[in-house]
Image (spheres, rainbow, N blue to C red):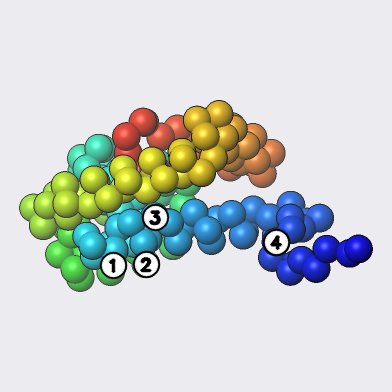
Amino acid sequence: MKENRRASDRASVCSCVNLRRASRAITRIYDDALQPAGLKVTQYSVLANLSRSGAVSVSALARMLTLDRTTLVRNLKALEQAGFVEGAPSPDPRERGVSLSETGRAAVAKAQPYWLQAQQLIEEKLGVEGVRQLGALALALEGSAGDDAAGDEPGEAG
């Protein structure tokens, strides 16, 4: 007898489709966890990296996040309007610098426990080895795509 399964119950033969499905699922887990803090994972990632790095140029932050500069500038504009990020001096006068505001530091402190909950949920779903493999796969794919991947430190969003 044939098993009647939906297409969404099976992995695709297309690696891109599978990765996009996984990306949407993991983003949903983090966004749901961060909702009480009023942040999306994309916002938390920028804020957490700024918290860790201190004042930095927009280009340096884009490299840390492995984002193109245009996407980052668009994200920073919204974070500045929310009062989380402010302009800062840059070592290179041709570059714009940014840093966390006091409101941004408070937002990171409020959101971090929720981010940790999402991290733990992912580890429960994938296991420690699965999380390690996920990181290794991401690095391998970034390397094959020619990206300049920056390593994230444990305990912070990338």
* Residue 40, horizontal then vertical, whole percent: 34, 62
How far apart marks 1 and 2 lie (CA) works out to: 5 Å
Residue 24: mark in rendering: none
How far apart marks 1 and 4 lie (CA) works out to: 39 Å
Q: Quadrant of the N terminus?
A: bottom right
Earlier in the chain: of badge 1 and badge 3, it is: 3
Identity of the residue drawn at 20% across and 70% down: 81
Under mark 1, the amino acid is Lys
In the rendered image, which residue does mark 4 sit on? Answer: 9
Mark 3 closeness class: few <14, some 14–19, many ≥20 residues within 10 Å: many
* Residue 76, horizontal then vertical, whole percent: 30, 62
* Residue 62, horizontal then vertical, whole percent: 40, 49
Under mark 3, the amino acid is Tyr
Under mark 4, the amino acid is Asp
Residue 56: name its quadrant: top left
Q: Is residue 109 visible?
A: yes
Residue lying at the far front in this picture: please name it: 1
| Of marks 1 and 4, the one in the foreground | 4
**Mark 3: secondary structure:** helix
Q: Are marks 1 and 2 in contact (CB under 8 Å)?
A: yes
Earlier in the chain: of badge 1 and badge 4, it is: 4
In the rendered image, which residue does mark 1 sit on? Answer: 77
| Of marks 2 and 3, the one in the foreground | 3
In the rendered image, which residue does mark 2 sit on? Answer: 74
Q: Nearer the viewer, residue 142 or 32?
A: 32
Residue lying at the far right in this picture: please name it: 1
